[in-house]
Each structure stands twice: as structure tokens, then as C-alpha cells.
Image (spheres, rainbow, N blue to C red):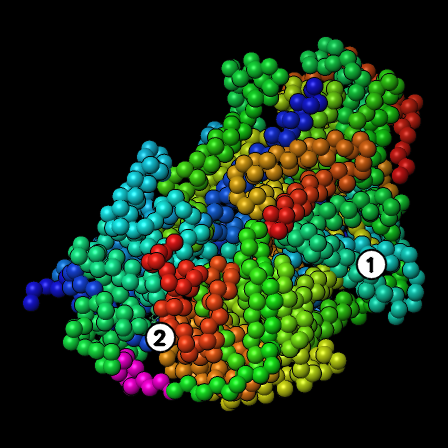
Amino acid sequence: MNIFKGLINGMIAGATPILLAALGGTYTYYAGIFNIAMEGMMLAGAFGAVLGSYFFHSWLAGLLCAILGSTLLALIFILFAVVLKTDEFITGIALNLFAVGATTYLLRQIFAVKGAFSSPEILPIPRLHLAGLEKVPVLGEILSGQNLLVYLMLAALLLSVYVIFKTRFGLRLRAAGYNAPSLDSSGVRTAVIRVWALLICGVLCGLAGAYLSLGYVTLFSENMSAGRGWISLAAVILVNGNPWGIALISLLFGFTDGLGLWLQQSLPSQFTAMVPYLATLAALYFYSMRRKRLAR
Amino acid sequence: MSVPFLAMQEILKIFPPAVVALDRVSVEFRPGEIHAVVGENGAGKSTLMKVLYGLEAANSGQIQLRGQAVQFHSPGQAIAAGIGMVHQEILLVQEYRVWENIVLGLEPAGWFGRLDERQALRSVQQKIDEFHFNLDPLARVGEISVAARQKVEILKLLYRNVAVLILDEPTAVLTPQEIPQLFAELRRLRAGGKTILFISHHLEEVLELSDRITVLRKGRQVATLETSATNQAELSRLMIGRELARPPRPAAAPPGQPVLEVEGLSYRDGAGRLRLQDLSLQVRAGEIVGVAGVEGNGQFELVNVLMGLNPPESGRLLVQGHDLTRAEILERRRRIAFVSQDRGRLGAAVRATITENALMTHHRLNPRFTRWRGWRLEARAALQFARRIETQFGVSMASPEQPFQSLSGGNQQKVILGRELLLETPFLLLDQPTRGLDVGSMEYVHELILTLRAEQRAILLISADLEELFRLSDRIVVLHRGRLVADLPAVSASLEQVGALMLEGKEHPDGPQAD
Amino acid sequence: MGRKLISALLGVLIALALGALIMLLQGYNPLSTYAALFSFSLLGWSPLATTLRNAVPLILTGLSASVAFASGPVNLGQPGQLLMGALFATLGGLSLDLPPLVMIPVLLLLAMLGGAFWSGLAALARHWFNMDEFITTLMLNMIADYFTYWAISYPLYDAEAFSPMTPQIHRAGWLPEFGDFNSNVLVMLAAFGALWFLFNRLTAGYEWRLTGQNGLFARLGGVNIERNYLAVMLVTGALAGLAGGLVVMAGPHRFLKGLGANYAWDGVMIAVVANNGLVGTLLYGLFFSSLQTGALGMELITAVPGEFIQVLQAVIVLVVVAGRGRLDWLLERSLARQKARERAA
Amino acid sequence: SPAASAPKTEKVVYLINGALGDNAFYDSGQKGLDQVAKDFGVETRTLETNFDAGQYEPALQAAVNYADVIFVISYGFEDQLKEIADQYPNKIFVNLDTVVQNEKKTITSVDFVEEESAYLAGVAAALATSDASLAGTNPEKLIGAVGGDVDPVIQAFVFAYTNGAHSVDPEISVETKYLGSWDDTAKGKQAALQLYDQGADVVFQIAAAAGMGVLQAAGERGLYAIGVDTNQNDLVPGHVIASDTKDVGKAIYEVFSSIKKGTYQPGQTLSYGLASGGVDLDMSAAAPVLSSAAQAQINAVRQDIIDGKIKVELYQP
Ligand SMILES: Nc1ncnc2c1ncn2[C@@H]1O[C@H](COP(=O)(O)OP(=O)(O)OP(=O)(O)O)[C@@H](O)[C@H]1O
Ligand SMILES: Nc1ncnc2c1ncn2[C@@H]1O[C@H](COP(=O)(O)OP(=O)(O)OP(=O)(O)O)[C@@H](O)[C@H]1O
Ligand SMILES: [Mg+2]
Ligand SMILES: [Mg+2]
């Protein structure tokens, strides 16, 4: 039971940052932006979170600074890809490099440390104990007591489904991706919609980063996004931006990540570490085959 | 006279580096008139309207609406001021339903920006009823006819309560039967007080519909006339600067052996829909067969199956007796030359050089262009070949090494024609080879096609322009919903007859119907 | 070409100026920092040799990305292909012992085979299952990382070592050095020449380029798109693999942990700033190598942290790419303005 | 005369294969270096190569161009170190944590006997997991370890840790998870959480920066961890029972002092075990977790090892 609960909790923990960032990617996906900068945005968010929490002695300030950090990257993306019309792929690659360099550089300049920065002064984002949920049999233990950001992630998921498919903004957002000239000639500037999409993506990636550095653990380490932004991107592309599909893929990834560590009892650790990536490939395989079948 | 309703004054528009699209054009529009703008391809008609609609910024000049100088930086501002535009190429979101497309940008919304679907549907239905448009607001735009899409575009503007409607070549995509219906709708709108700016190449249409006509030629405003005071000959002279004399069609030599033989060809698309159904067709040497049909009735699929982009479900395809039904594309290209309607997508790699574009296919079929058993390209031969196309087809270019995209549309088409004709294939598939060309280039291509017929080549010509079909074809076949519904000798067929077949799939329709 | 060069130089200068601004804000002296940076990478034979030597993997992975992108496939798998190339070369170097004249070419071939094997997996996944190489190559990077790590931790582990690494390969497989200069540069130049010839003179290269610009057009022109896709993936994989082989054969002469750490996105980055041009990739590869090589010296002399170079590289990429074409655009616009003024007068 | 041949010692470089900021191994060396700079007034620089094999040789070259004395943690570039040391026989090379010797025998190696302290860590873990008075412990005889990589040094740690635990109670089993990463803290935490879920009460982290996640997991679960390399007992107060320290800084300081004093001899291998204080199990904390009885028992084992009464088995790969 404990072990099962541990696996479920591990799955939630692994899925949260990926799902948050991927939801951000959904907005840019529907807006017709090829956004690969989620990795960098997440990292900037993680750094901002620690910075804010440490200096203002408040996790809320940390959360805000996380959003600020990744939104800053989103703004650079906007400047180059939307205003100056630089290729989006290139902008994304450069921003990812920039995020790694800049956070490492600032870590050294601000905290005079390298590698990782941890301190009791960094206040983590609290867990939420929901009295009502705790009483639910079996699931209660899992449903309650998760990190605040886990609940925020759930809210973001539901809100995104609503915003994208049920609101005026959502209609325009999807039109921006389907047919930008049509939207423009309808009197809505596609560029403005894209700016909003990127800003929302920035906010969500900021939350994802905050979860990494203030939620799951309480410290910042260099490159701590560790490829999760890429997995988010893969998730978005895999299911064509469908938020429910993204949730599924994120959970799958979170699950296999934890499973990998379990499998070490019978396999060398290098092979178990491959499991999430193999799972992503498998998901891609099934998805491609399904698409192929549908096409026939 | 008092202040004009809407006036464009001294509009100058130069596309970098130096294309003067509009050369100090001044036009006034009156309230409640249908004002036609005519001119050859590239005369600047679309550009003028785009400037008015806030899609392009003029270099100088100004626009006055009811005496007030206005400046639109985006279509949104133009719409807010009561000016709306239906583009030459229809701009709708295919994935959306009709009502979604109509309200896009001006959606009724409730709390938290929630899209008020019921309210939206109600207002859309109201507009549909008000203007007697026959449309289903819940239909998906990707699945309705072109004429219906155009109605959606017009409704979209009416939903925004614009006073001025700009229609850029609205008849280009319609069949002869659909045009009167559109005109009736436009007249109704005029009666309701709307001002309509109407762009067309077709002088008969313009003369029938409009109150006044502005003629543009090479970016200059040549004249603005009362329709009642002019005629086709005068307009045509103003547009082209000379009288257009149609050369008589050379008499056809008796056609020879069958070259293209299509037997019972069927094709099903990815979604399982039957797109081509039991097609049988022959084109003989020295014969031009025209394919008529409303866009989307299988032309696209026919081209794809003939060229080997999609495998047919059943049936056979033979050229000169060789079975090419399942042949590799390269194998087909030994016997089929292909000119597509979409130069940028199918006909060329626009960023590559002219030489590189000219060489395509030849580099595999003609050993002259390679050395080392085909492994290495013979650069000099390729260059000479490009030069040959330049002289033989009268292409005006600075150098064969310049990017293909730096050529004008007409010259691009000439390079493509040169490449394909010099393949010396017995059969040619021409898919709207004059689309987007101006009158001069169009004449050239037409003559070339007739010359090819004289050389005993077999030609299948797909065109949306019925006039072109009648002018060039020996026989006309009609595609309707993926079936060949008629095979008529061109001399004895009438425009109305073919139009009816295109729309209804049979002759003598009981009345025009869009969907 | 002239205008392209000017716009590139201008971009780099603006980026360096932005870097100087950051340093000023942080209280460093930009002039002495840049002086230290370039004197440690370019001034003198030994720094120059180091720069050249470090440039080899950058340029080869850059060429791999350039050729792939220019021909269509989005091969982002250079890091993994490099590792597999290095592993294959190491395997060969451990198990074979031939005279150097045979040994070196054999190991280079093995390296290319390793890279091509890895990119070939992605290509086949696309060919058979229609799986997007953009994602498969990314995933295969991670898998190659762990796989090679396993290989050097267990089957190939050097019993005398303190961290995961293989024993040294046989001496015959070591690339000869001429003074400070390592002959890996010669191999890279040979590969560059061959690639340039292939891309610009051979029928295959012509087809790849036109497919990259417009695949449908090429397909209709009779080009065998599928076969070319496979060929491009294999060749670009082989290039990245060669990079890995050269890293082993020129440097530590064994496969050790962290071998490909730094080349993760560098190849793609260089291809992107060079706009997928081969010559541009060569030049930018040298330039980025001089930045990376000089970073250590900069840190030693001026105490500006080496991470600064990473920031600077990203700024260069953005400025150069955003600036590309902007010069043309400005020029054309001013011409149009001038003409408008003439007409209006 | 010794004065004439006294080597130059104005500039000192500390060159490491990894990166500072691990709160542990590399940082401890940095502390010693800072002390050297302060006490002897020499110029010091630290070069990090971030586990990037491509940087090893250039960094080494830059180091010899700049410095007179080079302290180096040379995992991964032992070959290059030997070569360079042969080329520059007049420079002082001190290799830390492993034993490396060049042909000219000029490299001095500092070898830490990590088995001795890890053995003690095993003893501590075994005592803790069977101590019912510690809050949260269960009767299961299971302890855990989280390693960064499967490499010989980490395996040596685990080997001795296991032996130490068995010396207390042979029925105790040791579960180990490897992260394949030295900096993914989230993964470190997840691995530790799984070990706690399996029933372990104590987890020994041997994963540098990623190990921070292990310590935080202990805090979250109200269970126990053992830190590594430096004293990490106060990082998560009340949950780190001890730290297996490796005082790289002390070694740097002592070797540099010997150079200054003129007692330095190149080519030696200096062994830093429990006896010399190079490695230790540090239980001091603001609020120590282990009972004084347990501490006394551990201290007794330490003394036995120093006195040679207990022979700690060395790991053989
Ligand atoms: N974006 C552009 N950049 C450069 N030149 C352009 C651009 N758009 C139009 N032009 C040029 O401006 C001129 C006028 O074009 P415009 O589209 O207004 O012609 P048109 O009269 O609408 O022709 P058509 O009947 O083919 O629609 C042409 O020479 C065209 O090539
Ligand atoms: N959309 C466009 N974007 C950029 N340049 C364009 C565009 N359309 C046309 N041009 C350029 O404008 C110039 C004139 O084009 P246009 O198509 O009007 O030529 P034209 O005078 O009609 O010649 P032709 O009769 O051969 O078609 C060409 O050099 C072409 O490259
Ligand atoms: Mg037009
Ligand atoms: Mg034209």
C-alpha cells in the first residue's frame, strides 16, 4: 500500500511540472507558434522562485518572481519572434541556451555559489491539507496533502479547457493557429493573440519552474529543468494540443520516471533511467500508428 | 458638390524595392452605389482595396470618410469605421463552423469572456434571414461549397454592419449559374443602402452590375466612368491600352492514336470518401481535352492520381500503351509533362536558382546533364539549358543564377512551361496553366498550347476559366462529384450547357442552387 | 555574399557590444575581458591549436545539422549520434590493432557507422511507423547518453580507473599530432570538402537541396524522396558520429564519462546562425570555438565567470539571426521611400 | 641549496572535473583553498570543467600556463595529467582523491580512505534503524543509500556502508538507488522517498548536489538521512543523523603548508583516513539526533579502526 501510494505520489510529482509547462505550450500551439522555449522558461521560473522566496522571505513572492522570470523570457521571445519576425525555432533554441547561461551566471553573481543554492531562508510552497478530502477512503491520502501547485495545476488544466474551447479568447486563439490571415481580416490582430498566448505560456512555465525549485525540493540547481521542457513539448505535439491528452502523457511520464527507479532492483540503473524516454517513443509509436490507421 | 462619402486621394504605394503598385490614384465612392474597379492582372486593384481596408500602408495620399481624414492601421479599424472586405482568396477558418467564422472578432460574450453561443447563433440566423442567404450556420466551413463560403464572407461583413463592402473578384470562383444569384444579393444590399466596391476582370459582369467603373492600368487610374455611358470596347481599350483581337482558333488536324487512356479509375481519400468514381477517359495525339468542373469536384484528386502522388483504388492508367497505374513518379515523368496551378507549391522551389529549377526531372531522364553514371551533375549543360529556355520561351531574366522567386509571375510560368515541354513527352497534363497570369502572358501560353497540339501531343487541360476551355479544347469533359458526367465536342457545346453540368451533374437543371 | 558577410559581422559586433554592456553593468572591464578572451584562444600557436582542435566537433555536428535542415529532415540527434560514433570508434580501437595507416581510417569509418546507425534508427522509425524524427532524435539522444554510460560502466569498464571510462584504445588509433596541432583538423577539413562537393556538385546533393526547399516539387520532379530522406539521415548521422570518433582519437584516446556533454545544442546552434550554409557553419564553428576556448583564460585573468560566454553565445545567435535580412530590408525600404518622395514631388 | 631550488608558489590553481556548489566534496576543497589564500597571501583560482570531457585538456593547459601549484581532482583526465606533469616537472601537481603517478614521479596523490568513514556511516545507520526511541522508525531491518552514479568510488562507499551495518546486525539489508545524475535534486528526492516507502528509516546520500533532495525527503517524511563530504547535519535540522565527511580542504591546506615549510616531497601518496582526520563521521549538530549511547558506540568503533583493531575491508572493483 505504501509503495503503491509512493508510486502514485511520485507520478503526481513527476507529472506536475511537465503538465504545467505543457499546458503553457498548448496555448502557443493553438496560436500557431512553434515554441520550444518551454525548457528555458521553466528554468528561468525555477531560478526566479528561489530568488524571490529567499530575498522576500515569502513563498508567494517566490511564486511571483518565478512568473516574472519566465515571463521575461516570454517577452524576449515576443520581441524576436513576433515583433522582429525571427524564426521561432531559432529563437527558442537561443532562449534555451540563454536561460542556462543566465541562471548559472546569476547564481554565481548573486549567491556566489555554483551548482546549487540551498538555504533555510528559502521558504517552500506549502502543502494543502483539505479536511474534506482527507476523509475519502483509499484516495483521501493521495488527494489531500499535495503541494499547493498540484491543485493549481488541476485548476490550470480545467481553466485551460474552458478558456481554449469555450471563450471568446479561445475562439480567436485557435483561429490564430488555423488561419492567421483570416483572423487578421476579422479585425483581430493575430500578433496580439500570439503575445497573449506566449505570456500565458510564460506564466504556466513559471509555475512549473516554481514547482521544481520551491515545491518538490527547496533549492535551485543549475539546469534543474533537466529536459522536462522538451518532454512537455513532445507531449503537446503528440496529442495535437489536446489538454486531456497532455494530462495523460504527463502522468505517463511521471509514472515511468518513478518506475525507472523501482526497476533498479532487476536492471542496471542506466537502463532504468531510459524508461521515460522509451515510454515517450512508445507513445509516439502508438499515436503515429493510430493516425496512420485513421488516414487509411 | 458636398463632401464625398468616401474618397481616396493621391494614393501612392510602392513595394520594396521598386514596384509601383499604385501611382497617385484618386477615386471617390458614393453612398449606395456599386462601384466596379477593373484592370489587368497586377494593375493594382487588390492593392488599392487593401490600402482602403488597412491591410497595406500607403506611402502617401489620404483617405476621407464623410469628410473626415481617416487612417486605418488594421482591418479592425476599417471595420469599426464601417468598411469591410471579402478577399480574392477566401479567408475563412475551415475547421470552424459557419457561425463561428461569422462572429469571429466580434463575438457576443458573457461572464469571464465565455462565448455566448446561443446569442451568436441567434444573431447569425437573423442576418441570414434578413438578407435571404441560404446557409446552415452549423455547417463546417471546410465542408461547404465555394459559393457558400463566399456568402459566409459577405455575411461576416453584414454581421458587422458595415456601410461599405469590398469584394475582390468574387465571381472568379463561381459557376455561370451562381453569378446571377450573387448579383441579386448585391443589388439587394445596394437597395438597403450599402456601398459596394466590386473588382473583376470580366467586363460583361461589370457592365451588368455596376453604377460606376474605375479603370486601373499599371498602377495608374485611367478613368472613372458612369456605367451607362460606356461599353465593353471602350473599357477594354482603357484597360489594356490597345484593342484585344482574338486570333481565330486554328483548325484541328484529325487526332491520331490514343495516348492517354484512363479506365475505370477510382480513388478514395484518407477519410474513406470516394473522391474519383469510375473515371474513363481518352486523349488522342493532337487533341486537347478540357476538364470543366467546379473546384473541389475531383480535379485535385485526378491530378494527384495521374501524377502518382496518391494511389488509385481501382482502375488503370496507360500512356502510349504503357501501364503507369502503379509506376514510380520518375517512370511517369518519362511520358507525362505536368504544369501545375500552384507555381510556388508544386511547380518550383522558389528560393533555388532558375537553373536549378529548370534542371528538375531532366537531371534524371537525360544523361546529357550528368557525368559519372549519373552521380555528378554537369553544371555547364544545366546552365546552357536554362539559357535555351530563356531564348526559346522569351523569358526575361537577369541571369540564370538568380533566384527563381525574383522572376515575375508570367516569367516564372514560362520557365516552368519550358522545363516541362522540353521533356518532349507525348502527354501533357496542364492544371490551370494561366492562373494568375496577365492577359499578355495568357495569350502566349494559349498559343503555345495550340502549337503543341499541332505537334501531335496529347493534352489534358484542367481549367476553372470556361472561356479558356472553350477557346482551346477539342472536347470538354465535365467533372461532378468525382464522376465524369459529360464528354462533349467543344464546337457544339454551349457555355450554359457546361455550366449546368458542372453544377448539377446533368443537363437542364430546374433552377440554380448553390449547395 | 558581400552583403551577407557584412550583416553577419555587424550582428556579431552588436552582440559583443551588448555583452560589453552587461559586463559594464556588473562592474567588469569589457576591453580587458575581450582581450583576455581572444588572447587565450587566438594569440599564439598553442591557443590557436586548441581553438582549432575544439572547433572540430562543433563544426562537424554543425555540418550535420546544416545538411539535415537544408535537406528537410529535422535531425536534432547530433548529441546521441556523436556518442554512438565515439562508442563505435572506441570499440574498434580496443579490439583491433592494425598499422596506423589502416587503423585510423577503419576507426573513422566505424565512428561514422555508429552515428549513422543511431540516426538510421530514427529514419526507419519515420519510414516504417511515420514517427516524427524531431521527437525520436531528441529521445534517442537521452537513450544514447544512458546506453554509452552503461557500456563504459560495465562491459568496457577500465578496471584501473576511478570513474566510468574505457581503457585507452591501441596507440595505432591515436591521431598524429604536429607540434601543438592535432590532425583531427585535417580529417574535419577533408570531411568538409567531401560534403561540400556532395552537396553542391553531385546529383544527390542537388536533389537534397531542392527537396529541402520544396519537397512536393522535388517529388513531382521524380526525386525519390524516401530514399533521399534515409540517405540524408544516414549521412548527417555519420557526420555527428565522425565528430565523436575524432573526440576519442584526438583527445583522451578513450571513452570517458561526459565526453559529449558540451556538444548538446552547439551543432544545431551553429547551423542556425549559419543559416544552414556549409561555409558559414565552418566559420561560425571556428568563431564559437574561439569563444569557448578563450572562456577559461578569461576566467583566469579577469575573474569574469565562464558562464558569461554562454550568455554571450545566445545573444549572438539572436542578434545575428534577427538581424539577417534586416539589412536588405532596410536598404530596400529606403529605396522605396526615396522613390515615393520622387513621385510625390 | 634548498633556498635556491625552492619552487615558486605564488599562484595556486584548484582544478576540478566537476563544478562547485555541491555543498560537499568540491566545496570543501574550495574552503581549504580560501584558507591558503588568506594565510599565505597567494593568488588562487578555481577552474571547473563541469564534467565536460572536452574541457579537461584545455583547462589543464590553462592551469599550468597560469599557476605554480596545481591541486587537481582529475577524475576522467588522469592521462592528460600525467602527460602535462611530465612536461612541466618544475610545477607542483597535487592530485586529490585518487592515486595518479606520472613517469617522472612528480605528482603527489592524496588518497582518502573513504571506506573507513563509510563503514562508520553504516554503523550509525544500523544503530538508528533499530533504535525504537527515534521518532518514526519501524522495526524493519532495512537501510538505504542513494548514489549519483554507479562508479567505483560510490561503490566503495556502499560496500563499506553495508559492511559497517552488518557489523552491528548481520540481518540488516541495504537497498541502493542510483540516479545517473549528480545534480537532479528532484530525482534524488524521489529515490529517497521510494526507499522510505520500502521501509528504510535511514538513507545515506552519496550524490553530491542531487543528494540535497535526499536530505529534504528525510525532513518531509520525518525520517533520517546521512550526509556526505561536508557536515550537512544542520541543513535539515533533526533529520540528518551524521555526515560522512571528506576534508579535501584540510588536505589542500596541509600539503600547501608542507610546501611552504620545505617538507614537501613530490611523488608521494598521502593516505587520509580516520587517523589523519581526512575522512570522518561527523555527528555534531545544533541538536544531535543520535542518542549519546549510540554516539559513544560509534566513537568506540572509530577508535578501534584508528587503532587497527578493526580492519575495514577495501573495495575491489
Ligand atoms: N506584397 C507585395 N510585394 C511586392 N509586390 C507586390 C505585393 N503585392 C502586390 N505586388 C505587386 O503590386 C502590383 C499590383 O498588385 P495587385 O495585387 O494590386 O494587382 P491586381 O490588380 O489585384 O491583380 P490581379 O488581377 O492579379 O489580382 C503587382 O505588380 C504585384 O506584383
Ligand atoms: N508578392 C510578391 N512579393 C514580392 N515580390 C513580388 C510579389 N509579387 C510580385 N513581385 C515582384 O514584382 C515584380 C513584378 O511582378 P508582376 O507579377 O506584377 O510582374 P508583371 O509585370 O505582371 O510581369 P508578368 O507579365 O511577367 O507577370 C516582379 O519582379 C516580382 O518579383
Ligand atoms: Mg488582385
Ligand atoms: Mg503578373
What element does badge 1 sit on? helix
Image coordinates of residue A69 in percent, x first then y, are 48, 42
Image: D11 above or below B305: above
Question: Start and end of the magenta stretch?
Answer: B236-247
User: What residue type is disc 2 on?
Assistant: Asn
Q: Which of C138 and B348 is in front in this view?
A: B348
Residue A19 is situated, as x and y percent measured from the top left of the image, at 56, 37
Q: Residue at x 31, y 78 (%)?
A: B218
Side (left or right) of B395 relative to B137: right
Indicate if the residue with disc 2 has its beta carbon within 8 Å of ligand 1: yes
x 30%, y 40%: residue: B122
Q: Per the image, is D149 magenta?
A: no
Question: Which of these two is toward me, B192 or C229?
Answer: B192
Left or right, residue D307 beside residue B141: right
Residue B119: give its label. none
Mark 1 or 2, which is nearer the eye? 2
Residue C38 in view in this figure:
no
Q: Mark 1 points at which residue?
A: C89
